[in-house]
Image (tube, grey):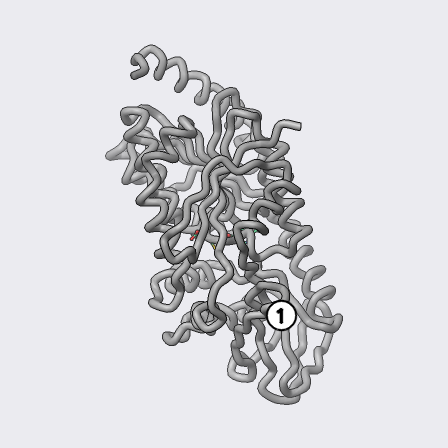
Amino acid sequence: MKSDAYYSIFTFHVMNNIAHFLPSLDSVQAQCYPEFQGISMDTPTLNKRFHLRQLSSQDKLAMLRQDVKLGLIERPRSLPPKYFYDEIGSKLFDSICKTHDYYPTRTELALLQKHANEIVALVNSNTCVELGAGTSAKSEVLLSEISAHFNKSKFNYISIDVCEEVLVETAARLQNNFENLFIQSIVGEYVPSIQVLPNFDDPVLFMFIGSSIGNFTEQESIDLLSNVAKKMTFDDHFLIGMDRVKDKNVLEQAYDDREGVTAKFNLNVLTVLNKDLGANFNLDNFSHEAVYNEDEQQIEMYLISNSDQQVHIVDLNETLHFERGEKILTEISRKYSKASIHRLLGKSGLVEVKHYEPDNKYFSIVLAKRKKE
Ligand SMILES: C[S@@+](CC[C@H](N)C(=O)[O-])C[C@H]1O[C@@H](n2cnc3c(N)ncnc32)[C@H](O)[C@@H]1O
């Protein structure tokens, strides 16, 4: 049992580090949201407990133009999955998580609920950094456990996501739920966001759950995880959620749920292109498809052109010609075995500390540390 003095020194160090982080946020584009100031009438510290930093908002459109040029104009056609997540896409993803057919969310949540106590005791960290945090619905289980573990003293949550709306909405909810929580949100992509993180003196829990790592090719995954590993000290931990190889029918049903939510989510990326690039995609002229590629051990999500058609993109001054049946690859979701998880961690400078899986072996949550060379 540690003394109160330990906790206050511990908290002081972490908060001191965060305090170093804050001025840099303020000097760039950190904001306190006006609605938080409104709430602060009742809870005076609320707006001081949430800071938001925008990374490269001006470059976002340039990147979209570039990705569309490379991905849609060139064949075979593809789009990076990060463009799914505008405000509507994030809400649709949240709805996917609640469908019966999408087993990964409830399986990962159950694992976290079962093992949160052990994980939090093991990592003994009151600072969490989450990549692709979304609504933090699952990470909240760990935040709650951290709050209890440190006797409700101050703790820190740094959430990273490309969707600003989901970060802001989630921060408001989490702050209501945890009076002792300080939130830094970074609107940006994974790697640039990791690179602006300060060096913390005390142990940090990095998190990348929701099987988001599966959206990257093997080399991209290694690059991404290596970037986190390089940021970690040998006292830090990294919690990663990974979906497992399983029956093809279960997988395909999960990515083509019977309620049709994943289909809407997939098609929504065309709305993003209509909105941000002045394209004129007609969503009725495309269909959603999800197939499991057994050789590559990955789900592949496509949008299929229902007819021969032309789509004009004003912003790029380009007209695309689609043949009936032509496909746009919009997402891959790689599935892992225990062996491929170990290989990936090893190639990324990480080593497994704990591996949690349910009886049906549908999903893995891996707790890793930085590998000592
Ligand atoms: C599959 S969802 C997972 C959300 C949440 N972690 C969970 O487990 O339910 C992926 C999240 O990552 C965000 N995201 C996708 N691509 C990203 C990128 N390249 N950089 C940062 N965030 C990204 C999305 O906005 C979304 O909130």
The residue nearer to you, when weighing 293 against 261, is 293
**Category of crowding for the residue at label 1, using alpha-carbon neighbours closer than 10 angstroms: few (below 14), some (14–19), many (at least 20):** many
Which residue: 39% across, 44% down? 139
**Above or below — where is 339 with respect to 198?**
below
Residue 305, quarter of picture: bottom right
- 106 or 173: nearer the viewer: 106
Give the residue at x 52% y 20%. 201
Q: In this view, which residue lies farthest toward the top? A: 5
* Residue in the picture at 53% in, 31% down: 26
CB at mark 1 closer than 8 A to ligand 1? no
Q: Secondary structure at mark 1?
A: strand
Q: Can the viewer see residue 184?
A: no
The amino acid type, in three-letter code, at marker 1 is Leu
- Picture quadrant where residue 99 is located: bottom left
Which residue is located at x 48 percent, y 22 percent?
202
| Count of numbered circles in the view | 1
Q: Is residue 281 above or below residue 242?
A: below
- The answer to whether residue 246 is left or right of residue 1 is right
Q: Is residue 154 visible?
A: yes
- Report which quarter residue 3 is drawn in: top left
Split into 4 quadrants, where in the image is the C terminus? top right
Where does the image place residue 31, in percent across and percent down from the top left? Answer: 48, 38
26 on left or right of 176 = right
Quarter of the picture containing the N terminus is top left
Of 147 and 25, the residue lying toward us: 147
Label 1 sits on residue: 329
Q: Residue 297 location, x and y as percent?
A: 58, 63
Q: Where residue 113 sits: x, y (%)?
A: 31, 45
Residue 208 image position (x, y, % from top left):
50, 45
